[in-house]
Amino acid sequence: MPVEDEKLHAILETACSAPSAGDLQPYRILVVRNQSKRQALSNAADGQGFIATAPVCLVFCAEPKRSAAKFGERGQQLYAIQDTTIAAAYAQLAVVAAGMGSTWVGYFDEAAVRQVLDIDDTLTPLAMLSIGYPAELPEPTSRRKINEVVQHID
């Protein structure tokens, strides 16, 4: 089932409303609907097939020079990455709010993704988010207990 344009627009608006250092939004979001390109992205991600079968793949690319212009090396090395992943996380939450499912993909061959999408060296692909209506609900995975993750400092 395709993702409706208005829902996709709302997801992208939510991603673009994410906070970023200096409100620079040092990222680009590439929307990939083309089946052959999604298949090529799947191949670049070690054959993770859901990338090809989901109707939309959002590719979140950092724009490090945009952050570096204001914040120097820390902006380039850290803020651009943080800000891009925050935008992707906001998009993932918006997908759920729209009644759909998503899968975050960070395991991929960056050079292959660059080639498939003709991404120049000013952008760094950091994450792909496959979105669509799930055919089935996955089994819950085990998670660490909160007291194993959270430490209170007094």
Image: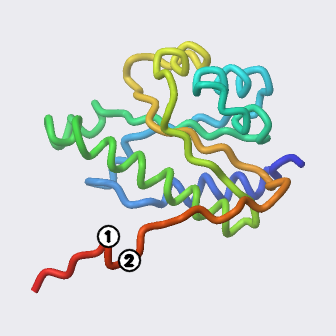
Please tell me whether mark 1 sits on a helix, a strand or a loop: helix
In the image, taking residue 102 as reference, residue 18 lies left or right, namely left
In the image, taking residue 102 as reference, residue 74 lies left or right, namely left
Q: Nearer the viewer, residue 62 or 65?
A: 62
Q: How many marks?
A: 2
Spatial distance from mark 1 to mark 2, Cα to Cα?
5 Å
Report the quarter where the C terminus lies: bottom left
The residue depicted at 61 percent of the width and 16 percent of the height is: 116
* Residue type marked 2: Ile
Q: Nearer the viewer, residue 89 or 71?
A: 89
Label 2 Cα neighbours within 10 Å, binned few <14 / some 14-19 / many ≥20: few
The residue depicted at 79 percent of the width and 37 percent of the height is: 53
Residue under label 2, please give it: 146
Q: Residue 103, how many percent across, how many down?
A: 62, 49
In the image, taking residue 130 as reference, residue 142 lies left or right, namely left
The residue depicted at 33 percent of the width and 49 percent of the height is: 82
Q: Residue 146, how many percent across, how many down?
A: 38, 77
Q: Nearer the viewer, residue 20 or 98?
A: 98
Q: Nearer the viewer, residue 99 or 18?
A: 99
Residue under label 1, please give it: 149
In the image, is residue 79 above or below residue 39?
A: below
Q: Residue furthest left?
A: 154
Q: Residue 149, how many percent across, how many down?
A: 32, 70
